[in-house]
Image: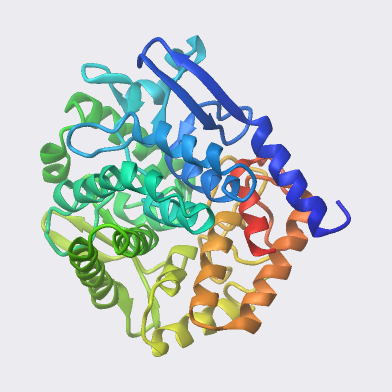
Amino acid sequence: MSDYSDLKESAKNLLLSNIKTGYSKGLKKHFFYISPDRKHYHQWFWDSSFHSIVMANFYPEYAMKEIETLLSVQQANGFIPHIIFWNLRLRDRLHPWWRKEVNEKVNRYITCEIQPPVLGISLLKIYERTKNIEFIENNISKVEHFYRYLSRERDPDEDNLVSIITPMESGMDMSPQFDIPFGNKSNNPGITKNHITELLKNYKKWNWNLDKIFQSSIFNVEDVAFNSIYCLGLEALSKLYQCIDRKKSKDIKEWSDRVKESILVKFWNKKNKIFFSIFHKNKEEYTIPIKTISSLFPIILDIPEKYTNSLLEHLTSKKEFWTEYPIPSVSIDESSFGPLIDTRFIWRGTTWINTNWFIAEGLLRHKRYEMYKKIREKTLSLVLKSGFNEFYDPFTGDSGWAMRNFGWSTLSVELI
């Protein structure tokens, strides 16, 4: 790949190579989606949301089919799962984690978890590229229903912020910020993984009943990145509804503004001048004082300049996030930074293209063009060096055990 036109062609071919289509006997539906890679065979919520954004540049009809497939399994209460098993293979049935993450009494073909709500953002991106108002009219109420589910079922303290109930729901599974709610002070990700295994056993025993889960206080986290994406998704829905229902557009914009205000009030840490996630335990609320990529995510929102300036100081500090191949998922001055590319304990310092894309979008929003150009060039050079991989070493750009030909890393071409 000698130039960016080659990179675009490679991104298109990668997405096309990962297409899965057919008919599911279990779910009794036709499907069309792009799997993350050859190993991660099934449909994953935020992966599909990202794939549709990129595919809208090449084959918009495929991007729309992907979203419609995702929405086709939406439950009556608005819930859309983290993973959909369109073809449930024997190896899946034997996988111990699969058995814990589904409620077989309800539907063994979908997991009981959510993922960061990128869906509204994807819908807006597709519309901006296609101007297909019929597609929006057919699907926007379903996407809104999902956001209503998050507000109604996942905000037990009614502070306008969504709680996640497992680390996997953040999309950043083994991030060290999740060590703290489990009482793991050793920075040993293996201990946190053991806690996650026990957590899933309990949730399975309770049939994933949210009332029991929140009452247990095993894991109730309000994550900065998740809620920033939630807020941006609501903003996207408001923009789309301007074409259909101006009153609803106004109502959802006010909803988005309430979420943003809670992000600024509850997550901002005056001492460190950065955003930290929160966890709840036995009706008490605690800050998680670890600088991760999640801490930078409010930059994607329309926030006052004082916050943006502070986040840029952290981002550009060589002691924190400014590495040779930024942006690492954990600040390098944290004791929990690492392990990196030669372990399955991911999100503990590696660089990821999807988070880079979000931060780059935020920099553009705030007209920080010079910093945007730097992130753009660093990200593109990383992919040119190592390919579309799952994650990268923030110092060398290598990928170690990361999955190759990873779909969401094609988001890099959005920066071209």
**Residue sitting nearer the eye, 59 or 27:** 59
Residue 5 in which image quadrant: bottom right
Q: How is the image coloured?
A: rainbow
Tell me what residue is drawn at x 55 percent, y 76 percent.
Answer: 364
Quadrant of the rendered structure where residue 406 is? top right
Write the residue at 12% across / 58% down. Answer: 157
Task: Examine the rendered structure and indicate whether residue 27 appears above or below residue 42.
Answer: above
The answer to whether residue 409 is visible is: yes
Vertical position of residue 310 compared to residue 294: above or below = below
As drawn, 221 above or below 404: below
Horizontal side of residue 161 vs 54, given as left or right = left
Q: Position of residue 114 (x, y in %)?
A: 33, 41
Q: Is residue 262 left or right of residue 373?
A: left
Residue 82 location (% of width, % of height): 38, 37
Q: Is residue 385 visible?
A: no
Instruction: Please name whichever residue, 244 or 192, is drawn nearer the observer in this view of the structure.
Output: 244
Position of the C terminus, as image quadrant, is bottom right
Give percent across and percent down for residue 155: 17, 54
Q: Residue at x 36, y 64 (%)?
A: 232
Name the side, left or right, on which 88 lies relative to 354: left
- Measured as percent of width and height from the top left, residue 336 is found at 51, 60
Which residue occupies the foreground of this view, 331 or 316? 316
